[in-house]
Image (cartoon, rainbow, N blue to C red):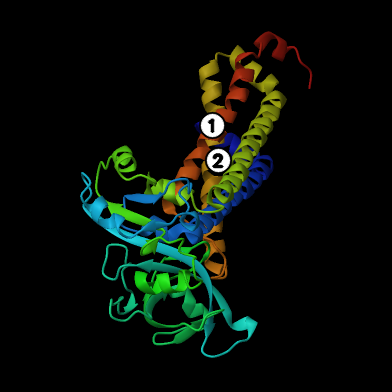
């Protein structure tokens, strides 16, 4: 470590260039991870935060709410299944909210209407106002992001293409669906909105999109066998079944993978070139008794110090960037993700230094001593 630090101080400019490149790479990795986390949260936070363990869909719907249609009569049968502690129906539709009586296009706000049973385990915690009530069908609770659109407690808004109006009685946090604010309404009101067109319910009695289950070690195969036409999945699988969710996250992960591979290549090449330039010096050190292990530790220590410092600077830059980003930007830093990618970057850097270590072990002291610089 002493030799590594001494050389870092001696060749400041050379190592500073590598550090700047690695800072930019780590900064970009953290920015992409925050963007990916923000997009996935915006797409499915309603599903991710709900207190459900399993979801029952219509068979063949591929765990998609928009393709599934079940009867609410299934609730009683599901409640009798082994290990099922609670059952609650849920439905979703996309809509546009128009504030007040205005019909101007610029006043329309895209929303996702989520139908649930008031007071059930699916109702999110209220951060302001009151919760849903079974005897007040047009009273809704909405995600706090609607405040940014000018909505406030007590406001009434009309749905585009409908004569129905809804009144905000409460605000909730981190409840978005398909990248828009979630609006929670009693399931009966949701049915009225979702199946306003005659025959759109396909003759299903008290239709819902899915049944949410609470319980540990629920046997999904038993449910699917005993209740024909159903497909029971975990909540995580239901999140993956949301339209575009896998593709969106797959794109971000591919970009991160390429970026990590590029960082490994850059660090490896830089230190390999440095090692080749110093092969004569390494040869002399070997000739006077320095072991391969000693020299290898010096190189690895250099990579470790340089990478760790660059990653720390990259983290600071990322949090600084997050502080000045607009609220509309789907960016969310997760401390666990930041730590995970920091460790990954550090490990990749150390592994890339093994190319230099292998080069050092092959240096012949006699040949190195005979070289002329």
Give residue 290's position: percent from left, percent from top.
Answer: 55, 17
Q: Residue at x 55, y 40 (%)?
A: 307
Determine whether 75 is above or below 100 in the image.
above
Q: Residue reaching furthest bottom? A: 101
Whether the residues at callouts 1 and 2 have beta carbons within 8 Å, the answer is yes
Q: Residue at x 65, y 16 (%)?
A: 283
Is the residue marked by circle 1 packed among few (<14), some (14-19), or many (20+) residues within 10 Å?
Answer: many
Residue highlighted by disc 1: 350
**The image quarter in which residue 231 lies:** top left
Determine whether 95 is above or below 221 in the image.
below
Give residue 186's position: percent from left, percent from top.
Answer: 35, 72
In this view of the protein, which residue sits in the foreground, 328 or 187?
187
Give residue 223's position: percent from left, percent from top.
Answer: 30, 43
Look at the numbered disc 1 and give the secondary structure of its residue.
helix
Q: Residue reaching furthest right? A: 372
Is the residue marked by circle 2 packed among few (<14), some (14-19), or many (20+) residues within 10 Å?
Answer: many
Q: Residue reaching furthest top? A: 366
- Sequence-wise, the earlier of marks 1 and 2 is 2
Q: Can you see residue 132? A: yes
Give residue 4's position: percent from left, percent from top.
Answer: 55, 33
Disc marking residue 192: none
Q: What whole-number distance in Å separates the C-alpha atoms at marks 1 and 2?
A: 8 Å
Determine whether 293 is above or below 349 in the image.
above
Q: Quadrant of the C terminus?
A: top right
In this view of the protein, which residue sits in the foreground, 142 or 137?
137
Q: Is residue 112 left or right of residue 368?
A: left
Residue highlighted by disc 2: 307
Determine whether 330 is above or below 110 in the image.
above
**The image quarter in which residue 364 lies:** top right
Q: Residue at x 64, y 19 (%)?
A: 359
Look at the numbered disc 2 and give the secondary structure of its residue.
helix
Q: Is residue 83 left or right of residue 167?
A: left
């Amino acid at each position: 470590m002493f030799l590594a630090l001494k050389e870092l101080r001696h060749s400041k400019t050379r190592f500073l260039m590598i550090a700047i490149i690695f800072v930019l790479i780590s900064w970009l990795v953290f920015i992409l991870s925050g963007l990916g986390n923000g997009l996935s949260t915006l797409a499915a936070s309603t599903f991710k935060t709900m207190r459900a363990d399993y979801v029952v869909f219509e068979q063949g719907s591929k765990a998609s709410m928009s393709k599934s249609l079940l009867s609410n009569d299934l609730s009683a049968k599901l409640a009798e299944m082994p290990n099922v502690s609670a059952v609650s129906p849920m439905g979703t539709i996309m809509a546009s909210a128009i504030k007040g009586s205005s019909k101007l296009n610029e006043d329309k706000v895209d929303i996702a209407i989520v139908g649930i049973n008031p007071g059930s385990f699916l109702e999110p915690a209220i951060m302001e106002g009151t919760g849903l009530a079974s005897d007040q069908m047009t009273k809704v609770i909405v995600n706090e992001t609607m405040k940014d659109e000018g909505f406030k407690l007590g406001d009434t808004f009309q749905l585009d293409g409908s004569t129905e109006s809804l009144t905000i009685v409460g605000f909730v946090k981190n409840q978005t669906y398909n990248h828009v604010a979630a609006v929670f309404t009693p399931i009966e009101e949701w049915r009225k909105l979702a199946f306003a067109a005659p025959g759109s319910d396909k003759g299903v009695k008290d239709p819902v999109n899915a049944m949410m289950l609470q319980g540990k070690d629920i046997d999904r195969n038993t449910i699917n066998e005993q209740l024909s036409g159903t497909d029971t999945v975990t909540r995580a699988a239901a999140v993956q079944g949301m339209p575009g969710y896998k593709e969106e996250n797959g794109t971000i992960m591919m970009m991160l993978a390429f970026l990590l591979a590029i960082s490994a290549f850059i660090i490896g090449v830089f230190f390999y070139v440095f090692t080749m330039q110093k092969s004569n010096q390494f040869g002399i050190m070997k000739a006077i008794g320095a072991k391969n292990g000693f020299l290898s530790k010096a190189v690895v220590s250099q990579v470790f110090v340089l990478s760790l410092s660059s990653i720390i600077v990259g983290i600071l830059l990322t949090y600084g960037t997050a502080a000045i980003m607009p609220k509309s930007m789907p960016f969310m830093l997760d401390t666990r993700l930041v730590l995970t990618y920091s460790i990954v970057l550090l490990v990749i850097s150390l592994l890339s230094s093994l190319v230099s270590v292998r080069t050092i072990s092959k240096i012949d002291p006699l040949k190195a001593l005979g070289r002329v610089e």
